[in-house]
Every structure is written in structure tokens, then in C-alpha cells.
Amino acid sequence: MWEPHFSRCTEIHHAWDIPCIGTPGDGRYYVEGPRRTSPRIVETAGAQPARAMVIDRLPPQRDFEDGP
């Protein structure tokens, strides 16, 4: 199963608070998460609408100067 997972952190331990995108392999895409065990949020007819759904669900901007 190949699906992009996104994180606000670039080092170990990754944040698991952003949905991911997957595909059943037939041209459709789905957004689920933020964890793989979370329910599907939506199923779309293409990658662009799925990407837009993830962007809409990004957490608020945070300042990490003092650490995560």
C-alpha cells in the first residue's frame, strides 16, 4: 500500500495529526486519517480534490523556535 503521509516534523518522531491520501488503484482517491486506523474522511474522483481536502485539514501554523 503506497500512500503519502504528511507530518509537520522532519525528524523522528513524526506528528500524526495530518490526514493522508490513498487510492484503491482505479483512479479514485481517498483521504483518511490522520492515522491509518482512522475512518475515511472522503473519497474523490481524482488526486487534486484529495490534495485539497488534506490542505483544508492542516493544523494551524505553529512556531517551533522553542521546539515541537
Image (spheres, rainbow, N blue to C red):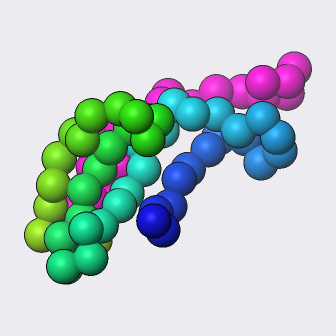
Q: Quadrant of residue 45?
A: bottom left
* Residue 16 in the image, given as x and y percentages of width and height: 57, 33
Q: Residue at x 77, y 48 (%)?
A: 10
Answer yes or no: is residue 58 visible.
no
Is residue 7 highlighted in magenta? no
Question: Does residue 37 appear left or right of residue 62 in this picture?
Answer: left
Residue at x 24%, y 41% (from the top left corner): 40
Q: Is residue 13 above or below residue 63?
A: below
Provide residue 14's location: percent of width, then percent of height. 71, 38
Q: Residue at x 85, y 24 (%)?
A: 67
Which quadrant holds residue 57?
top left
- Total labels drawn: 0
Q: x, y (%) of residue 15?
A: 64, 34
Residue 17 horizontal/vertical position (percent): 51, 31
Along the horizontal axis of the image, is 47 left or right of 21?
A: left
Magenta residue span:
49-68
